[in-house]
Image: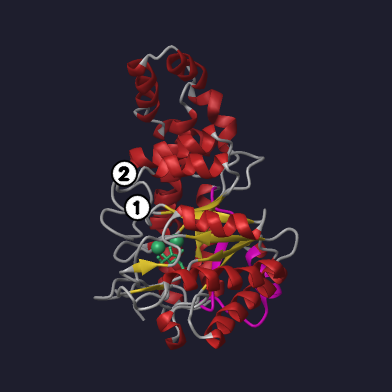
Amino acid sequence: MTTFSDIAPQLTHQEIELPSWAFGNSGTRFKVFAQAGVPRTPEEKIADAAKVHELTGLAPKVALHIPWDLVDDFDKLGAFAADHGVRLGTINTNTFQDDDYKLGSLTHPDAAVRRKAIDHMLRCVDIMDSTGSRDLKIWLADGTNYPGQDDTRSRQDRLAESLRVVYDRLSAEQRLVLEYKFFEPAFYHTDVPDWGTSYAHCAALGDRAKVCLDTGHHAPGTNIEFIVMQLLRLGKLGSFDFNSRFYADDDLIVGAADPFQLFRILYEVIRSGGYGANSDVAFMLDQCHNIEEKIPGQIRSVLNVQEMTARALLVDADALADAQTSGDVLAANQLMMDAFYTDVRSDLADWRASRGLPADPIAAYNASGYREQITADRVGGQQAGWGA
Ligand code: PSV
Ligand code: MN
Ligand code: MN
């Protein structure tokens, strides 16, 4: 039987990247609820993310979204992050907020709009050169609302051509990660709707193009862990955007809606070599905290990922292989369920304390005085970018 002390050393490998936009005000198309003390600048978002890392030891990187986090001097922003004990991570492109992008960006029928979107992405790669970021993450809002609105085949061809220009600009250490989403904001078709389409483009581009799997971007009932396994098997899983969904792209706290699904996903990641010192799979959160507090919301999120990672590591791989080989269906399933039902929370609290971290990071945040300080210091906090 695998015990917590057997797996504890593997927990030190965990790094979860926080999205800068999780710290800004956010909401739905109905209402954005402002909160006291939210960041007004990219620096303040980084400071909040650094607080999450300080209290959990799990989140050493902050992902930026351009232009939401545009600054004049990215070298300076990187130095600011380093002073706060974190690094700048994935650069997320934004080709969905300008009027020009109404009919698409990289797939737009007008070459001038495609060029504008490509130029934005090339600018993002310039920023990566300054920040030392490895990954350029591309999520496209491109698609159509009505059958016949545009020629879907031509849009795929334009997408391939546009991506090629961006990919060819990357340096040898940089990667392009292409995120898929089955609908929204386009409702009839999306130009990168599924892992197969993302995979097809990434395979054509080259080794440094990989798929980004956002857990909220699938139809209900999709076996996401199977997709994880397949992409890892093909060497094409680049990164995760973790969040929870009850209905659509809800962007709720990861592990809140379906902890068992998160466990199953992390089991496949571990089983296929996507976790650990030698893995290049990026674990990111892509969440918005519309009504709950943001910093504790991010703390809860990274702890949820850690908790399900620990449980997934507890699966007794040898016993499982034996049960699978001998066709013992019930024993094999029992081994998964035994690990899933193991309560690791007090072991994790002890593990944190043994590493000089607070046993209860949310209680430590509540006692830290940081909330009171940012509430007093920051007036007129910035919106994350949604619902503007
Ligand atoms: C929109 O669906 C989205 O949530 C995508 O998941 C991106 O990763 C994110 O926005 C930031 O652009
Ligand atoms: Mn995402
Ligand atoms: Mn999304």
Badge 2 density bin: few <14, some 14–19, many ≥20, Cα 10 Å = few
Task: Count the numbered circles shown.
Answer: 2
Residue 162 placement (x, y as % from top left): 59, 73
Residue stretch rendered in magenta on the structure? 58-81
Residue 329 placement (x, y as % from top left): 35, 18
Q: Amino acid at mark 2?
A: Asp
**Tag 2 and tag 1, C-beta contact below 8 Å:** yes
Residue at the spot 42% in from the left edge and 41% down from the top edge: 225
**Which residue has dot 1 on it?**
244
Whether the residue carrying mark 1 lies under 8 Å from ligand 3 is answered with: no
Q: What kind of element bears circle 1?
A: loop
User: Is 52 left or right of 81, judged from the image as shown?
Assistant: left
Q: Earlier in the sequence, mark 2 or mark 1?
A: 1
Task: Between residue 174 and residue 78, name the one nearer to us.
Answer: 174
| Ligand number 3: quarter of image | bottom left
Residue 318 placement (x, y as % from top left): 52, 17
Q: Quadrant of residue 168?
A: bottom right
Q: Quadrant of residue 384?
A: bottom left
The C terminus lies in quadrant:
bottom left
Q: Amino acid at mark 1?
A: Ser
Disc assigned to residue 258: 2
Badge 1 density bin: few <14, some 14–19, many ≥20, Cα 10 Å = many
